[in-house]
Amino acid sequence: MPTRSDFEELLRGAALRVTRPRLAVLTAVYEHPHADTDRIIHAVRDDLGEVSHQAVYDVLRALTAAGLLRRIEPAGSVARYESRVGDNHHHVVCRSCGAIADVDCALGSAPCLTASDDHGFAIDEAEVLYWARCPECLAATAAGPGG
């Protein structure tokens, strides 16, 4: 987990002012990978006390635009945020509970897939979303109703 001074350096490196809400949001996302905005707001409020939803949304937008956070939005799910940026990894999502985990590229470099026709675009990233059931949901199903 990065330190407060690491977060300050990240913000300055992205030409963003260092503010308590930005530090709190970065901390929340690093501590809770793939968290939705409600979870992030809760973590920020635990850290700072009262802070508005809009303030957190604004910070998330600024940090994402600066490339310090990545926003993912699996179909049928609210937006989630993660601190793992700068690589071309993918995600696996549980169909039952919505848990999300990172999946590294099979080939290791971006983009790790080759399009059959790039239509003249300079493709630099591929986004893959795997749908599955997580180990906990599989175990619950195997146990059946009533345990």
Image (spheres, helix red, strand yellow):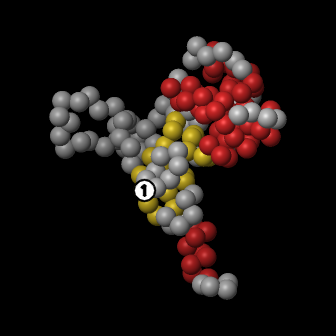
Picture layout, residue 21 above or below residue 101: above
For the C terminus, the quadrant is bottom right
| Helix, strand or loop under label 1 | strand
Residue tagged by mark 1?
Answer: 130
Picture layout, residue 82 above or below residue 144: above
Picture layout, residue 49 above or below residue 143: above
Can residue 13 be seen in this snapshot? Answer: no
Location of residue 4 in the rendering, given as x and y in whole percent from the top left corner: 75, 26
- Quarter where residue 107 is shown: top left
Location of residue 101 in the rendering, given as x and y in whole percent from the top left corner: 54, 52
Picture layout, residue 94 above or below residue 30: below
Location of residue 22 in the rendering, given as x and y in whole percent from the top left corner: 68, 26
What amino acid type should be assigned to the residue bearing mark 1? Tyr
- The crowd level at tag 1 (other Cα within 10 Å; few <14, some 14-19, many 20+) is some
Give the residue displayed 74% in from the left and 37% down from the top.
44
For the N terminus, the quadrant is top right
- Quarter where residue 2 is shown: top right
Q: Is residue 1 left or right of residue 81?
A: right
Give the residue displayed 47% in from the left and 46% down from the top.
73
Location of residue 102 in the rendering, given as x and y in whole percent from the top left corner: 52, 48
Give the residue displayed 67% in from the left and 86% down from the top.
146
Give the residue displayed 26% in from the left and 28% down from the top.
122
In the rendered picture of this protein, how many numbered marks are placed on residues?
A: 1
- Quarter where residue 110 is shown: top left
Can residue 14 be seen in this snapshot? Answer: yes
> Front-most of 38 and 132?
38
